[in-house]
Image (cartoon, helix red, strand yellow):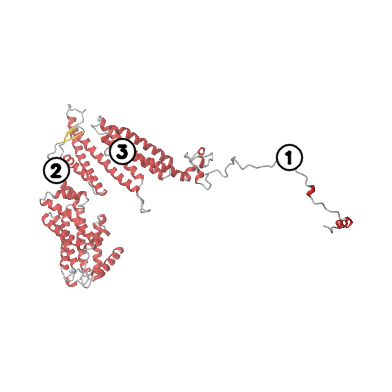
Amino acid sequence: MAADKQNDVKVSLMEENKENLPDGGLGLEILQIIKESQQQHGLRHGDYQRYRGYCSRRLRRLRKTLGFKMGNRHKFVGKKVTVEMLSDNRYLLLVLMEAERAWSYAMQLKQEANTEPRKRFHLLARLRKAAKHSEKLEKLCDSPRVDAKTKLEAQAYTAYLTGMVEFELQEWKQAMEAFNKCKTIYEKLASAFTEDLAVLYRQRVDEISPNIRYCAYNIGDQNAINDLMQMRLTGGGGGMMAEKLEALITQARTKQAATMSEVEWRGRTVPVKIDKARVFLLGLADNEAAIAQAANEETKEHLYETLLAECRDTIQAVKEELKTEAKQRERSSDGDTGKVSNLQYLHSYLTYIKLCTLVKRNESMAHTLQAKLKEPEADENKRGPRPQDLIRLYDIILQSLAELSTLQGLEDDHTFQKEVSLKTLVYKAYRCFFIAQSYVLVKKWSEALVLYERVLKYAKEVQSKAKSLNNSLKDLPDVQELIAEVNAEKYSLQAAAILDTDEIVEVPQQLVKDNTPLCDHLETFRFDPTLVGKQPSLVQFPPDFQPIPCKPLFFDLALNHVAFPPLDDKVEQKGKGGLTGYIKGIFGFGS
């Protein structure tokens, strides 16, 4: 409630500052206010009761702020907002919140009316009350104090709620006129204002369009059914229109089902006498086409679930007839119990449709998860898809294929059994691939490598068996792409194993005990713990000495055998100094 009050204060200040202009009159962003309030207070999850409580609390706060109290705690005194009071746009907001409170209560009762039909009367009363409040808002906006844009929005809002009332009363013509008026106003507003506001107006137009088409169909426009089917493909027609649209499609198929009497499957023609089975089989092609043309994954998932629900209901109806047939066979002693009956074969056909639809749905979900796995994680705190999620999907696919191979009436159909076994191999290969991916995440390199080899084995087996069954490979994933991806993952796995020190320590010692440096075995892959350590063994240092040719040394040996001529005659002789020289020599004076 404190958060509600803070939001109200912000919205009120924004409305006073932006729209209570002196020269343009009072203004109120009606559609923007109700859309923001609905998204923030429950309608994002379809909780109309929470939104109704928010409208009540906001009304109480507005009345308290404006001094617009309805008496006191002892006595109620009703008051009405008049044109003379329009000095503040919050008086317009007061009437708008009253209409929203009544509308949200009506939508809450509509949800409860599915199990309690009597609440439909209360629903209509609250819708009329909401339309009455909207008419009061439109009259107040006719005042010259209110700007032109607010007048147009009030008219569109009144037309929308009036159309809702007439729609529930099944007054198709009046409802269509009201919705068309609302659509026209919002289209004009979208073309006249900025892109931010235009988006809101276009969204409202998209919400109204299915209602207009439905009214046109009920009036007598047969072309409207095609537009409704197209809106169903694009995800339109939500809310109150969803159930009516499904009922309309079922009604149209029921009219056509009277002409359908038999169905052919795998060379055998089976009569179809159950009306529910006729309706389902008649709409099967349309449902498959709708799934193929779905605009997004959410719409495709919804169409798959709808088709599976219809298929389960049809199978249940056939089972009831089978019980009756079994009792009749027990009474008759001459019945042929060896051959599969037409009703049992029809049951097998419907089961085949259900299982194939399950396979396609899970395969579609797997493709979506694979695309998300390859995307980088935007938020680390948010849990993204993991390979384990895909393993679960492929487990369900394999379980469905196992049930296909045990269908009654198809035990001797060897072509069918070969097709199922081939599909089983393909999905086993993909399941094994994602199991290997899960082992890679926990750094179990050996287990992952073995599983990758198993994937290649399955893929090659598929390629060898697919030569005789080319037609059955049209809807299957391409195993050639899987083979290329596995080969790439194997190289990445070897590189990751080298970089992971803890795993390398666990490698048997005989692989690395020779301490050979890396430069001596570049052509051989080997787990070597020294390569990621502090002292990697890359080369041998210092290197071993090797003999090399060097510069020769020259020795002059001929000198010992050469006789030189005497040089005595050229050497100077010292003269003798006598006694004086002798004495000087003794005492060192002559040196």
Query: What's under tag 2, amino acid-wise?
Result: Thr
Give the spatial CA distance, label 3 vs label 2. 35 Å
Q: Which residue corresponds to mark 1?
A: 561
Q: Nearer the viewer, residue 564 or 98?
A: 564
Q: Nearer the viewer, residue 343 or 432?
A: 432
Q: Position of residue 331 (x, y in %)?
A: 17, 30
Q: Quadrant of the C terminus?
A: bottom right
Give the spatial CA distance, label 2 vs label 1. 135 Å
Q: Is residue 57 above or below residue 538?
A: below
Give the spatial CA distance, label 3 vs label 1. 105 Å
Q: Quadrant of the N terminus?
A: bottom left
Q: Residues within 10 Å of mark 1 (few under 14, many from 20)?
A: few
Which circle marks residue 254 in the picture? 2
Q: Residues within 10 Å of mark 3 (few under 14, many from 20)?
A: many
**Residue 554 seen in the figure:** yes
- Answer left or right for 291 relative to 372: left
Q: Quadrant of residue 265?
A: top left
Residue occupying the far front of the picture: 569
Q: Which residue corresponds to mark 3?
A: 398
Return the disc, 2 or 1, that comes first in the chain's sequence.
Answer: 2
The residue depicted at 27 percent of the width and 42 percent of the height is 360
Q: Nearer the viewer, mark 3 or mark 1?
A: 1
Query: What's under tag 3, amino acid-wise?
Result: Leu
Q: Position of residue 542 (x, y in %)?
A: 58, 44
Query: What's under tag 1, amino acid-wise?
Result: His
